[in-house]
Amino acid sequence: MQATLIGLAVLIAWMFYLNAVVRERFEGQRFTIPARVYSEAQELYAGAPLSADQAQVLLEQLGYRTAGRIDQPGRYQRSGQTLRVHTRGFNFWDEVEPSRILVLDFAGDSLQSIRDISNNPILLARLDPLFIGQVYPGNREDRLLMPLQVMPPTLVAGLIVVEDRHFFEHHGVSITGIARALWANVTSGSIEQGGSTLTQQLVKNLYLSPDQTLWRKGNEALMALLMEWHYDKATILEAYLNEVYIGQQGQRSVNGFGLGAQFFFGTPLPALDLHQQAMLVGLIKGPSYYNPRRNPERALTRRNLVLRLWYESGIIEQLDYQQAINQPLDISTAPGQASFPAFMDLVRRQLAEGYRKDDLLAEGLTVFTTLNPLAQSGLERAVERRMPAIESAAGPGEPLETAALVSRPSTGDVLAMLGGRRPEVAGFNRALDSRRPVGSLMKPAVYLAALEQGYTLASPVSDAEVTVSGADGNLWQPRNYDKESHGTPLLIDALSNSYNQATARLGMEVGLANVFDVIDRMGIDETPPPVPSVMLGAHGLSPYQVAQFYQTISGNGFYTPLNAIRAVVHPQQGVLQRFDLSVEQRFDPEQVFLLQDALHQVTLTGTARSLQWRLPQNWWLAGKTGTTDDNRDAWFAGYSGDRQAVVWVGRDNNGTMALTGSSGALPIWAELMAELAPIQERRGQPARVEYLHVNPVGAVVPARCDDARSLPFIKGTEPQAQRRCNADGPASDLIDNEVEKPSIWERLFN
Amino acid sequence: MGTFVQLIRPVALIVSAALLLAGCVSQPGPSERMIQQEKRITPDLDSSAPVLPKSPVDNLRLQAQAAQAEGNWDRAAGLLERALRLDSREADLYAEIAEVRLGQGRFVDAEQIALRGLTVNSGNEERSARLWYAVAQARSGQGNVEGARQARAQACEFGRCE
């Protein structure tokens, strides 16, 4: 009697403990869901710079499937230049994009028109974004939470029929189920059959180990009873549907029907067809054994068995049953997602500034990033295509490596990033962490400092040999790449031809302090050592820092911080953080206009003139090559329209290459730009800037002169006097007050 | 073996009850989403003067105006920034984002964005005036009287003298 009482007391205490366990997990955060990271979404509108091929590649990447009928979200058809897409819709941070059928007509490189199924034009739509993974890789459960009311009723009823047909009658445990299981276990001599109700399965998955022990089974039954006592059937069912383990992808475990539908069919759960629903329900018995991608025949048999049960239980009609069992498995070849380790590394670092790791692992946050799948795949392809030829031209040595970054000058969005030659490898992220001398990429800072000090693009600069004695007494004697001096070129030509001697002399004339001030304002987050050689790039920067530097040039003199994240959304609290457009004026926009013109000259006649044949001649491009001592680094940084890219090529062991910026990095840049085909329109000419014709010594001459060229000047800085065509010598000697008046045609067209 | 009716009844009950409740939960159901979307596509502007957007940028701009009219600054800014990513050459968008920042009292941001807008504008005096006017207001908001005066003079030069 006493023993019984003690036993009862222990049981009661134990029940209290279990009760606390059950409630704590169910009342609080029921599931730990790692933050999901998404790419930028593709905008669709008439005139969008998107070809039919690009759109199709993107749809495939997103896991859309080509199909005879597009009656389901996540399907598309292509005929020639027309794509019919049944979009999935998406809950963005700023807007809910509905699922709908879109008819997209393309011509060449752009989307011509976009209509709905009734042929009504649609102004703007966007595809769902690409899932690019979790912030922290690891063995994690992943799921897309779905409320019960959006789940297909046949799936819910069908699950009950297959897994626990007395779900609505029992109180957590099924006596008959246990008896049957016991009998089976006794007769077989081991514990094989569970006889578990859905509630028990849920309890086991949420709280207990998978061991098949009597102690565990006892706890499971008690907790199931407690759970049913506290919560109604709908709550338990919803939790089960979101909890259940359904598949595996590497270390990531796919849980819940919501994610399962996306993972196997590329279609949101509410839109699944019967045969697809039956496959998901069938998977619960053995996600690995019945994996439809690995074991399609086994999976098909299992699915049809489930369908038969549904038909026999009256969940589906005979006609539906017949149709469903005749369907193929209908599994997407790959889950619609991609992995970009280098970019994710940047996202992780940026998130770490504002979020705790625990929250990122558990809170179910959604992170909307700036990654543009087309830019990223364009960059990866450009490297893949161009690297073999560059490698063979580089000569013997350790294999070449590369790092690159594509950004949007107007906003600072990082659109694509490569941390190494093999994009799929998460390792040393050269785009962020390598520090390599930048060579001539630094020169624009010297020229911008000169423009700020009153120089013009037409100012003559001596390219004679130069010797600078440093503060430490050392002499610095930079030499031109071709070991020759080039007389007295105009400032614009000294930059476009990347003359070291002219640049060093100009920098010393302008003053080191002024040059360093410009470098600082460009937005590099560190201070280079104050030595003159930095002017020619004898200082290591990462491609990311270089991109930030050039953003200020492509951003018309405004510093725009590079940014990888657009918004962070909490499942209950909504938008936690938005990254607004942020700009800060650092330079006079007119002076930057002149610098941009000089960088354009680089691509016409300077060190990057090969762009004239590598890309369409009517494209407006601006950029700068960079090559370091003994050809250890090849760089190209440049922009066109609203796309900027920085490319570095070199060896990890810092070995030499038979390459320069224009032969090593520029081919990749050009290939990438050809792929991106940005909108080609140069920034408008500022009101304070005018174009004048000058001769080779920088004096203003009539436009008709043979060697006259048109250069932009800020009003008030232009050379005052105008001279005859054939005049030479210093401008001050030969001021011509009686130069011929321009003809009416010249006045009209100049 | 239970019949279908036995099985489906509780499920149907749950599902229908849940659908009834759907209006109260934060995540709208698909049909409701459609309706919300339709509402957004057709901005609630003055019905006597219907403005039909011609381009996606105009469409977003109209929606932003509607959001602004409701004091929903974040949404307005988000829509305008989305438009800017479609076409970064539109100086008007910078003016409008700057005006949103003014409305939010974010004067430093407003000034910078308006100045940035001036660098993409070429020749259009009305736009220049609008951007300089925004600069003037932003500077006033920061207490920069002299800077505001200069910006106002610029706006006036382009035809907006207030």
Image (cartoon, coloured by chain):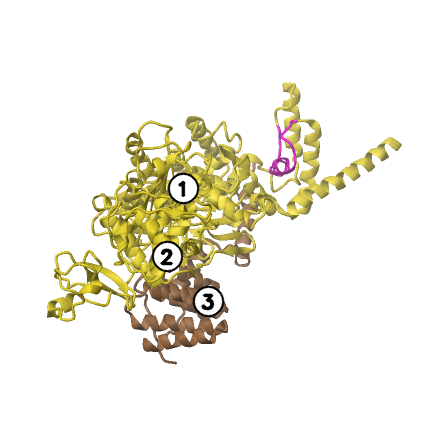
Residue A510 numbered mark, or none: 2
What residue lies at 68% left-to-right and 46% top-to-bottom?
A230
A385 or A100: nearer the viewer: A385
The location of residue A64, given as percent across then percent down, is: 37, 42
Quarter occupied by residue A401: top left
Chain containing the residue with disc 2: A
The location of residue A256, given as percent across then percent down, is: 53, 40
Quarter holding the N terminus of chain A is top right
In this picture, which residue range is highlighted in magenta? Answer: A194-212
A576 or A28: nearer the viewer: A576
Q: Is residue A297 above or below residue A497?
A: above
A256 or B75: nearer the viewer: B75
Residues under labels 3 and 2: Cα distance?
Answer: 38 Å
Magenta run includes residue A205: yes
Q: Is residue A720 left or right of residue A517?
A: left
Chain in brown colour: B
Disc 1 is placed on an element classified as strand
Q: Is residue A391 left or right of residue A710?
A: right
Chain containing the residue with disc 3: B
Quarter holding the C terminus of chain A is bottom left
**Looking at the image, is mark 1 or mark 3 nearer the viewer?**
1
Residues under labels 1 and 2: Cα distance?
Answer: 23 Å
Does residue A124 appear in this view?
Answer: no
Q: Colour of chain A?
A: yellow
Does residue A551 appear in this view?
Answer: yes
Q: Which residue is mark 3?
A: B101
Q: Which residue is mark 1?
A: A437
